[in-house]
Image: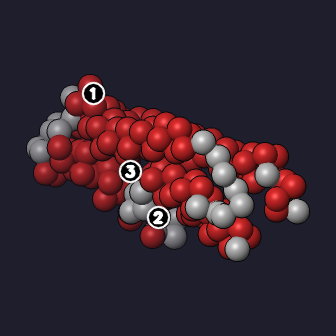
Amino acid sequence: MDLIFVVIGFLLMLVGILGSILPVIPGTPISWAGLIVLYFAPSLEFDWTLLVVTGVVAIAIYILDYIIPAVGTKKFGGSRAGAWGTTIGLVIGLIAPIPFGILIGPFVGALVGELVFNDTKGPQAFKAAIGSFFGFLASTFIKFFATVVYLFIFLYLVFWEYREVLF
């Protein structure tokens, strides 16, 4: 029975890491769900304090994921159109068969959002697009880092703390 929980938890960890990059999947909460699944394994017991702390971090990062790109856009003089353009550009960049679409898409999306929907002039639109792009990169890095830390916690709990139980 423990093996089923470990496998499901590990799959949630992998989906969480993928979700830290993809905008549609909430990566950090899904990785945290992997820790919860491991917590429910019958033979594996660990302190619930770990779940509370990692849960608070997951919620905070989930909220910051919406704030950081907007702050980056506003810091560089952008608008809501630039922030939306970043998200739409990311989705298109993922789908489009171009190299580095995941990096090019958000920048181009922010630029188009500023130029077309906000009527911002060229240099200011470019500056706002850079701010939106940096906000996106910062947010993605924070999510990715958190999900990798959750994976290391998961692996530590499985392979070190409870190696006698599982193997």
Identify the residue at image location x=24%, y=45%. 82
| Label 1: which secondary element | loop
Q: Horizontal and vertical percent for residue 55?
A: 45, 44
- Give residue 26's mark: none
Q: Is residue 30 visible?
A: yes
Q: Is residue 12 above or below residue 114?
A: below
| Label 3: which secondary element | helix
Q: Amino acid at mark 3?
A: Pro
Sequence-wise, the earlier of marks 3 and 1 is 1
Q: Horizontal and vertical percent for residue 94?
A: 47, 64
Q: Amino acid at mark 1?
A: Phe
Q: Horizontal and vertical percent for residue 31?
A: 54, 54
Label 2 sits on residue: 94
Q: Is residue 143 visible?
A: no
Label 1 sits on residue: 76
Q: Amino acid at mark 2?
A: Leu
Q: Is residue 56 above or below residue 147?
A: above
Q: Horizontal and vertical percent for residue 89?
A: 35, 57
Q: Nearer the viewer, residue 84 or 43?
A: 43
Q: Nearer the viewer, residue 91 or 38?
A: 38
What is the spatial separation of the Cα atoms under label 2 and label 3, in whole angstroms?
10 Å
- Give residue 106's mark: 3
Sequence-wise, the earlier of marks 2 and 1 is 1
Q: Residues within 10 Å of mark 1 (few under 14, many from 20)?
A: some
State left or right for residue 152 relative to residue 102: right
Q: Are marks 2 and 1 in contact (CB under 8 Å)?
A: no
| Label 2: which secondary element | helix
What is the spatial separation of the Cα atoms under label 3 and label 1, in whole angstroms?
15 Å
Quarter the N terminus occupies: bottom right
